Amino acid sequence: MTDLGEAARPVIAESWRRSLAARVDPDRHEAPVVYAPDEIEDLRGTHPLSTAVPLLEHTLSMDETIMIVTDAGGHILWCTGDNQVRHKAERVHLTEGSRWSEDVIGTNAMGTALATGRPVTVHSREHLVRTYHGWTCAASPIHDPHTGLLLGVVDVSGPLRTMHPAVAQLVSAAARLAEHQLLQVAPRHHVLTLNFLGGLHAEIDGRPLVLTLRNAEVLTALALHPKGLTAEQLALLLYGERGNPTTVRAELHRLRAQLGGVLLTRPYRLDAVVRGDFLDVRTALRSGDAGKATRHYSGELLPRSDAPVIREERVDLAAAVRKGVLERGDLDALLSFADSGEDAEVLERLRLLLPAADPRHALVSSRLRRALE
């Protein structure tokens, strides 16, 4: 195991502890590539930082370095700069579509800046994963100046020998310039929160929404298809072959009374930062983080819904979380998943893992008997 004593600076030592607790292997880990090139294009088009990227490129254009912009989850959406350095970066997955949060790739400037909310420089051997000891990176968070929400980070990375000490200050200054530009030219981004696992709760900019089940189904379908859907496509997703686009348009008209300009047309789509428990589970699963997926998974997606799009997503999420939990065999993850239903295999695994003297052992055994009846 990596010796924490090697990391002299407190910010690095704390990052190593978080990374090792997330089971990042210093010898074997590499950043996971989460998104394909066509998906990156879609994500860029809807990301609030897209308007600030030209300014960041102009400010941070330097020889023998690359500039990177990530989203709030640590996914690299933009990577520009020196072609030779970019080729080297691609070989170690320091490229668009990969994820660089601490929990998947350990201590690095982008992931640690996201974790701490502060500018960070990570030099050479301060990277937990040894593959990146030849790199030095400086990153700074960028927040939405209207809402305070973390939008992502801007980072400059390069071979150790090419990074000037002043780069860190320049990166921080560039992040503040980007926030100033967003304040001047970008409209306020609404924040739509959809918590539909095991229940039905939604908010727009912190204000609770009063939704019917059908409203929630529409919003879920649109959240799962951020590029937008036609009335015909929505009708198929919500009602199957018997769907009627006219019925869908009427439903959307009623929903727009609550959402206003957040619900756009041609195609129907959501003009907001969309957050949700089921979306958090999807992101965690996509990144291979079974523990995080389980923590967010508080029940089935809209359990009373019979809409085809909801049924399919509900089954996929439950199956993927269950598979990850069973493969990982983590006690806390198993306990968390067991709270969402009576799954005999999960309960049997818990019964074997929990000591007989643990009060939870008797409870799990009782639930297991009921599940097998």
Image (spheres, rainbow, N blue to C red):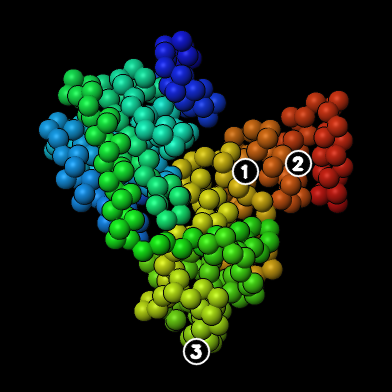
Q: Residue at x 31, y 24 (%)?
A: 132
Give amino acid for label 2.
Answer: Leu
147 in relation to 129, above or below: below
Element under label 3? helix
User: Spatial distance from mark 1 to mark 2, Cα to Cα?
Assistant: 17 Å
**Label ID, residue 246:** 3
Quadrant housing residue 138: top left
Give amino acid for label 1.
Answer: Arg
User: Spatial distance from mark 3 to mark 1, Cα to Cα?
Assistant: 39 Å
**Towards the viewer: 22 or 319:** 22
Asked if one can make out residue 39 in the rendered structure from this viewpoint, the answer is: no
User: Spatial distance from mark 3 to mark 2, Cα to Cα?
Assistant: 46 Å
Q: Contact, CB < 8 Å: mark 3 with mark 2?
A: no
Density class for disc 1 (Cα within 10 Å; few <14, some 14-19, many ≥20) is some
Q: Contact, CB < 8 Å: mark 1 with mark 2?
A: no
Element under label 2? helix
**Residue annotated with mark 1:** 295
Quadrant housing residue 87: top left
Quadrant housing residue 199: bottom right
Q: Nearer the viewer, mark 1 or mark 2?
A: 1
Which of the two discs, 1 and 2, labels the residue nearer the N terminus?
A: 1
**Residue annotated with mark 2:** 347
Pinpoint residue 301: horizontal percent, then vertical percent: 62, 60
| Residue 206 shown left or right of residue 299 in the figure | left
Q: Residue at x 41, y 67 (%)?
A: 271
Which of the two discs, 3 and 2, labels the residue nearer the N terminus?
A: 3
Pinpoint residue 366: horizontal percent, then vertical percent: 87, 42
